[in-house]
Structure formats: C-alpha cells, structure tokens
Amino acid sequence: MFGSLRTYIVSSKSISATPAFEALESALGTAKIAGIRCGITSHSPWEDVFQLAQDIQATDADLIITLGGCSITDAVKLAKLFIPNNVSTIPGAEELFARIRADESVKPATIPVINVPTTLSGSEFTCAGGATNLTTGHKQVTMHSSLYADVVVLDPRLSISTPRQVWLATGVRAIDHFVEGLYGNVAALFTDMREELGNEANEDIEKVIAGALGSLLTSLLSTKENWNDEEARLQAFLAVKECPRAGHNGIGASHGIGHQLGPLGVGHGETSCIILPWVLRYNWQHGDETARRRLGLAIDTFWGQEKVAETLGATGLSRKDADLYDVVGAYISALGLPRTLGQFDIKEEQLEGLAESAMKDWCTKVNPVTLTKDKVLDILRNAK
C-alpha cells in the first residue's frame, strides 16, 4: 500500500513481549525494519517525543507502525510533525503550537502511519496530540490535520494482552469523550473537521454520540465479565471510532483537569475515573437549561442500556433520583477502577498548582459552565 522499504515500529512493552509482535517482525523482515522502540512513558514526556523524532529521522524511516495506547500514538503524532519543522526543544515546540493556534502555515507531517491500538483512548482516530513537561508538570495539546493516521487496524484479539486496568480505564476515557462531546460547546469551532467526518445537524450528531456511548458502555462491561470476549472488544473499538465526532462537538473541564493529572502519576483513563463525575455534577448544578438537557441525554443513554441499567440498579440507584454524578460514578466503581486522588497519593499542597495548570488548558477554558481557579480547586478537593 505504501511501498515502504524502511518501517519504524513503536510498541508498548506489553505487546512487544507477545507472539503477535514477533509475527509482525517476521512479516516485515529484518531488511525492512528501520528501527524499533518499545515503550513511551505515560502522557508522552517531551524528552521521549524529541528522542523518538531524532531516531525516526536518523533511520530515514518511510513508514511508522504503532502498537499500543495513547502515549505511543501521541508521541508519534508529534514526532512526525516535529521532523519537517526542525523542532527539538520545548521552546521550539511551544512556538510551533503557537503558530498552529494562530492558523499560520507550518510544514505538515508527511511520514505515513499505521496505528494498531490496544486500548480505548481513541487517539488513533483524532488529529490531536499532546506532550508533558516533566519539570513544570504541564501538558500541552495541539491539533493539526496532518496528524491523522493513514490506516487504523482494529484487532480485538491483540488487545487481550493489554493490562486489565489499562483497558477498562481507557474505556472510561472514551466515555469521557462521548459525555463531554454531548455539550455541543465547540461545534462552531470545528466546522471544517465536522464536514470531513460528515456534517450532521446538531440533533443528528447527538444521536451518533449517544449511540456510540451506549454501545461502549455495554461492551466495556462485557469485557470485564469475560476478558476473552473478542466480539465485545470489537464493538468497543468500533464505538471509539466516533470519538472525533464527539471531540469536534463538545469538550470540557474533565479533559482540561485530567491533562494535568498525568504528570503526577495518574494514568490515561484513570484521570477520567476521578474527575469526570465531579465535573458533571458541577455542570449540572450550575448549567443552564441547554446544558442540563444535554447532560440529561447522557443520563438517558446510561439507563437505556439493559446491562448498564442492571449494574446501576444493583448499586441501589434509581432512574428517578440519581443524577449524572451518581450514575457515572457507580458505573466506574462497577468496573473496579479508582475514584479518588488519594489513591494516587496526591496531597492537598499539590492542588493549587494543579488548578493553575488546569486553568491554562483550553478544554477547561471552554467548559460549558464557566470555571474559576477556586471552582477547579473545589472539584479537586471533592475528588480527594
């Protein structure tokens, strides 16, 4: 398809130890493998991204194949963008991001990429990528049309080797994409991208997002009950395909605060497990009629799935009385995932800096209900 002669492979450490990885190496042949990197640190530190870009450029790779989750996918996105723009430092990356925000011309990424995801983060379907400054603890995210993958391969069998908590937690991350996607607060900003994906009317995009959310909620529970259920895994992957539609329709503070928790040791997805319920409660309590209607659609979607409704009912919740905080929180607990910052040993004295970083994040700034630093601190303290 690509006529590649020099393929660079970036794999998670867990996948690199499987027969599937050996099969890939054998299929490509030693002569066509330009380089292999096993593992990217969680939340893609700048140092890992710059080193990856340097390695890819040094090997003169003409194709990149990734096997893994969001940290690997994000690192490759940024690395392939940095190569043509000669970026190798944090100031250089920040300057490039500023030019992208100002809609100034930058050289597009040109090396084709095949993503083989093993988690449910959904990064492989978007043109967004982020990296973390380990000194300041701040994570920065950018978007560029050349960051889309050329091919995405969904292999449910391969994902069975993904650590259980990583699989389930990244599933909650995708739930976060869909629930915040229902906000509809950024749709006007992404008209061009929505046209590329299919320019549905507002009520149609809400149906698409709610449908994907419902499918994911059911299939994720099924994989928890039967780890080897390949059909449920495939349905989860297929639901996550709709993440770009959600992200181009709505986003909010769960993403903005979550981005800043990564450098403190909270994994992808676990950030959503802890923060999403509290952000939803804040938005419900302080939102206008439109915000409440859209949050109500999320509540209806949870209760509208038979398996999910049974799970929620078993916790003592009733559809009549439970708010979205209760519903999402109970679902996350049913998956056996963490719910508090204290489980990651995050201290009170760290919250001030977290709130400051979160307020710099674009996703927090566009939350459908206005947030201040003090309100973010309230959310963080509630999540302790």
Image: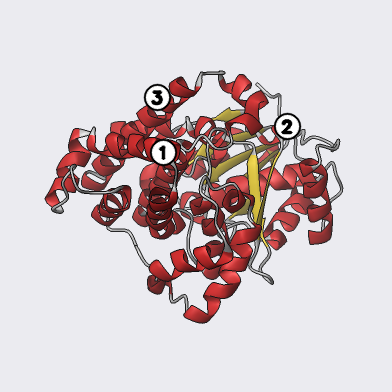
Q: Is residue 26 visible from the viewing direction of this image?
A: no
Residue 229 percent location from the top left of the image: 26, 37
Q: Which residue corresponds to the image point at 75% horizontal and 40% vertical from the top-left?
A: 61
The reply, left or right, for residue 198 in relation to residue 284 is right
The reply, left or right, for residue 46 in relation to residue 205 is right
Q: Which residue is mark 1?
A: 289
Mark in the foreground, 1 or 2? 1
Q: Secondary structure at mark 1?
A: helix
Residue 31 percent location from the top left of the image: 69, 38
Which of the pair 353/124 is nearer the observer? 353
Q: Which residue is mark 3?
A: 207
Say what amino acid the circle numbered 1 marks: Glu
**Cα–Cα span, label 1 and label 2:** 57 Å
Q: Which residue is mark 2?
A: 5
Say what amino acid the circle numbered 3 marks: Lys
The reply, left or right, for residue 80 in relation to residue 352 is right
Q: Secondary structure at mark 3?
A: helix
